[in-house]
Image (cartoon, rainbow, N blue to C red):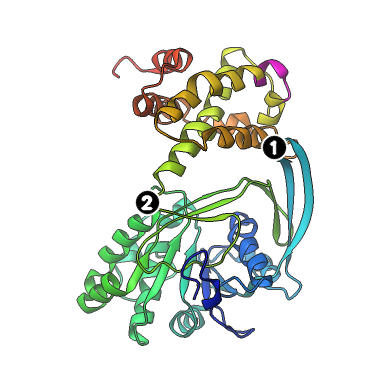
Amino acid sequence: MIKNSIEVENAMSITQSSTAILQIGTSRFLQAHADLFLSEALAQGQALGPVTVVQSSGDAGRRGRLQALAAPEGFIVRVQGLEAGQPVSFETRVTSVRRALTTAEDWVEICRITMEEVEIILSNTADQGWMPQAADTLTHFDQAMSYPAKLTHLLRARYQGGGRPIQVMPTELIPRNGDRLRERVLGLAAFDPAFANWLGASVRFVNSLVDRIVSAPLDPAGAIAEPYALWAIEDCPGLILPCVHAAVQVVPDLDRIEKLKLHILNLGHTWLVADWQARGGHEEFVRELMADPNVRIRLEALYRDEVLPGFAAKGFTTAPDYVAATLDRFANPFLNHRLSDIAQNHAEKIRRRIGAFLDWSGADAPQLRTLVTNTASPDD
């Protein structure tokens, strides 16, 4: 098994039919992120194994996608954007998926695969999939359950089938996603104390942070994505990596990466929207703002004069490189990132992305402080 980024010689040998990774979720994000990384790593003999994809929603309208995901010829991911200011555009074919199943029809087979083959359960499910459901209290599987409840019953099948240790890796954009999922699963497993004890001792829940803009799906499977990609995995005792790949980083903790993403990339998006609203702009997409020299110059000055000094004071030596990559991502001429989407919950985003940056960094940032002050409600 791949224990870390340098011990690749211990990678598990697999058969064509065996799948060491069970992926819950069929999103275009996973297709252009984890599935692509695994496909490229498998070609180099540096992946734990191929994937069984599981659709947990039971949406019959996505059956065509399921078939296409597991097609022998694979599916296409188109990468388009800027790297170091230069245009990038190419297609690659993803062949890491061996099976595609659905919890609505294939539960028994999914349990068998979980018991006999799987070393890692990977997930990226919709927000509503995490919401508690009435069926979650049942002591047997039901399709109406939330994702954490379905996972609980999959892990119970593993426990009843011999109880080999297993690793769970959520990639949903939830802070401390592994810890949060572990807490939910342990609570749901309380009906079976022996099973709950096994969960606490034998199931490793891993925190991670993922980042890649996947702008559009391809039909019937595949996606269009930007060049930038990151899968940051928090180190922990016994960690098993799904693959060795340039986009996969093992870090002591996720705090530094979370700060960069929240207070550079997300902060920049929020500043762009605030500036756009203040001047009554008619642009629709982020790339249109970045094509305006006046807007870009002012954003670059904001990063240079108000944001980077705060990161420098905290010892973040990689922040300038992250800013450069962020500017390329914003300027991506292929990406239709709507300003109206970013503008949703704008006041709350100013508080979390900009106000929290000022509190954390103590930076002398008059423009950002003015923005926070002007947005604060009378009760704040």
Sequence-first disc among 1 and 2: 2
Report the front residue among 332 and 308: 308
Residue 51 shows in this picture? yes
| Quarter of the figure with residue 165 | bottom left
Query: What residue range appears in magenta?
Result: 291-296
Q: Are the residues tagged 1 and 2 within 8 Å (C-beta)?
A: no
Q: CA distance from mark 1 to mark 2?
A: 29 Å
* Local SS, label 2: loop
- Residue linked to disc 1: 336
Q: Position of residue 43 (x, y in %)?
A: 69, 71
Q: Position of residue 206 (x, y in %)?
A: 40, 61
Residue at (58% x, 83% y) in the render: 14
- Residue linked to disc 2: 176
Q: Residues within 10 Å of mark 1 (few under 14, many from 20)?
A: some
Q: Nearer the viewer, mark 1 or mark 2?
A: 2
Q: Position of residue 13 (x, y in %)?
A: 57, 83
Residue type highlighted by circle 1: Asn
* Number of numbered markers: 2
Residue at (78% x, 56% y) in the render: 91
Q: Split into 4 quadrants, where in the image is the C terminus?
A: top left
| Quarter of the figure with residue 99 | bottom right
Residue 61 shows in this picture? no
Q: Main secondary structure of the magenta part?
A: helix
Drawn side of residue 27 relative to residue 357, left or right: right
Drawn side of residue 235 relative to residue 66, left or right: left
338 vs 305: above or below: below
278 vs 41: above or below: above
| Quarter of the figure with residue 149 | bottom left
Residue type highlighted by circle 2: Arg
